[in-house]
Each structure stands twice: as structure tokens, then as C-alpha cells.
Image (cartoon, rainbow, N blue to C red):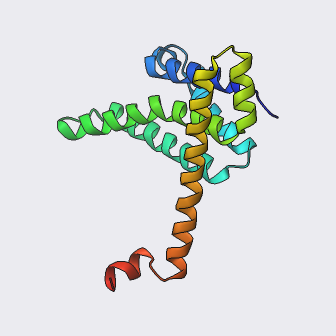
Amino acid sequence: MTLDFRTKLLMTVVISLVLLFGNLQGNYPILGLIVTFLPYVFLLLERKVSKAIKGVSLMIFALVLQYYAGLHAFRGIGASFVLFFSIIVLRMGPGLAMGEYSLLTTSMSDLVASLKKMKFPDSLIIPLSVMFRFFYTVKEDYQQIKEAMYLQGLVTSHFFRHP
């Protein structure tokens, strides 16, 4: 299943806005859960299993924290931090995951073609494509540096024990 970049962009915006406003979770909790876990289903369909499992486990952890905090009525500043963390994760996490899915599964040519179909000006398309290519290059360079450090024995445990 391949989605057009325009569809991915629309889904990212809709999921982000719907969950940030928070009315859906209160009025329709089942639909709120479906929208919350939808980006992780897309990540699973694209075989990004580790990202999906990490995201789902974080969402479940935040749901349990929120339920436990509401059930036992925490008091004080600790309760405020617990609720703040759970609400931030539950409202922003799925939007970020959908954006990550959109960027991971969109090739540069699809991005440029979609932006041209949306009648974006070339003065915006060119900087966006250069920016996304830059991020891809930085990611590749970081992986190569990490591999070279590992081959030289500069992993974190050895690095800090024998600098």
C-alpha cells in the first residue's frame, strides 16, 4: 500500500490537530484510540517494526500513567509532572509518528511531484528538496561515523573508561 505524499501530509495535519485539541478522546474514546494508534499501524505496514513497537509501548505507558493518576488522584507537584508527561505524549506522539512515517516513506521525486501538483512555487520546492536531501546526508554521515567509532573501539563504555 503506497500513499501519495499529499495524503500523508493531510493525515499528519489532521491527526496532529485532532489529538492536540483533545475533544475526540473525551467524547469518542474508541475513535480517539484508533486515531492515536493509526500512525504506528502504518509504520508496521512499512516494516518499521522497532519504531512502531517503541511508539506503541510509549503510548500504552502514557495511557496507564494517565489512568493511574486519574484513578488514585495523585496530589502535589509529582502528580502534575506525571499528568503533564502523559498528556504531552498522548497528544503529540501520534502526530510526530505520522510525520516520521511521511518522511521515511516518501522519496524525493514523489515529494517534488506532489508539491508541483499542489501548485507550490519553485521558489519553495527547491529549498524544501535541498533541506530534505541535507537531512538524509547528515543521517548517512552520522551512521558512518558511528560505525567507524565502533570499529576503532570508541564505544561509550570503553570511551569513558579509557579516554
Please report the residue visible at 50 percent of the width from the left and 40 percent of the height from the top: 59
Q: Quadrant of the C terminus?
A: bottom left
Q: Is residue 57 above or below residue 24?
A: below
Q: Position of residue 146 (x, y in %)?
A: 52, 68
Please report the residue visible at 26 percent of the width from the left and 38 percent of the height from the top: 81
Please report the residue visible at 43 percent of the width from the left and 36 percent of the height from the top: 89
Residue 158 image-quadrant placement: bottom left
Residue 74 image-quadrant placement: top left
Relative to residue 149, is residue 112 drawn left or right?
right
Please report the residue visible at 35 percent of the width from the left and 38 percent of the height from the top: 85
Say if residue 58 shows up in the picture. Answer: yes
The residue sitting at the right extreme is 1
Say if residue 30 shows up in the picture. Answer: no
Q: Position of residue 150 (x, y in %)?
A: 52, 77
Closer to us: 9 or 123: 123
Q: Position of residue 84 (x, y in %)?
A: 31, 33
Relative to residue 156, is residue 30 drawn left or right?
right
Q: Position of residue 137 (x, y in %)?
A: 59, 52
Q: Quadrant of the N terminus?
A: top right
Q: Is residue 63 above or below residue 123?
A: below
Residue 33 image-quadrant placement: top right
Relative to residue 74, is residue 56 drawn left or right?
right
Q: Number of labelled discs?
A: 0
The residue sitting at the bottom extreme is 162
Relative to residue 107, is residue 51 drawn left or right?
left
The residue sitting at the left extreme is 76
